[in-house]
Amino acid sequence: MTTSNEPDVQTVPAAVPLRFEADRWYTPDELAAITPWSTASFAAWRCAGSGPAYTKIGRRIFYRGGDLAQFFTDRLRSSTAEQAIARPSKPFAREVRS
């Protein structure tokens, strides 16, 4: 039996090309199916105000393809030394009383 330090090909996730139709509206469920992020990730980004722009019609959430492409393009980096995009600070979950 030969051991190898290389990971099993089946356990390494394939790179996912993120291509969105600019004028199409996507639901969080559709995005979870075509990206590596879950619907919970998109919900957390909305809550924190750090995700892509979205619109809400009634109870439904929609993301425009052009906004998604811009969001991910703005976060491209070529080095870990590059400064991250500033995120809004999170508000306190509850008021602190003295």
Image (cartoon, rainbow, N blue to C red):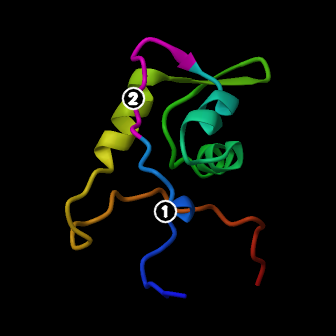
Residues under labels 1 and 2: Cα distance? 24 Å
- Relative vertical location of residue 43 with respect to residue 53 in this rendering, above or below: below
Residue 61: where, in percent of width, then height? 68, 26
**Residue drawn where x is 49% and y is 13% of the image:** 24
Q: Which is nearer the eye, 33 or 46?
A: 33
Q: Nearer the viewer, mark 1 or mark 2?
A: 1
**Residue drawn where x is 49% and y is 87% of the image:** 2
Helix, strand, or loop for circle 2?
A: loop
**Residue drawn where x is 60% and y is 52% of the image:** 48
Q: Given the current orientation, which residue lies at the most extreme front position?
A: 1
Label of residue 9 in the image: 1
Q: Decide if residue 31 is on the left or right side of residue 2.
A: right
**Residue drawn where x is 44% and y is 57% of the image:** 87
In magenta, the rendered stretch is 17-25
Label of residue 19 in the image: 2
Disc 1 crowd rating (10 Å Cα; few below 14, some 14-19, many 20+) is few
Helix, strand, or loop for circle 1?
A: helix
- Relative vertical location of residue 43 with respect to residue 22 in this rendering, above or below: below
- Residue type at mark 2 is Arg
Q: Quadrant of the N terminus?
A: bottom right
Secondary structure character of the magenta stretch overall: loop
Q: Which is nearer the eye, 53 or 23?
A: 23
Label of residue 88 in the image: none
Disc 2 crowd rating (10 Å Cα; few below 14, some 14-19, many 20+) is few
- Residue 97 lies in quadrant: bottom right
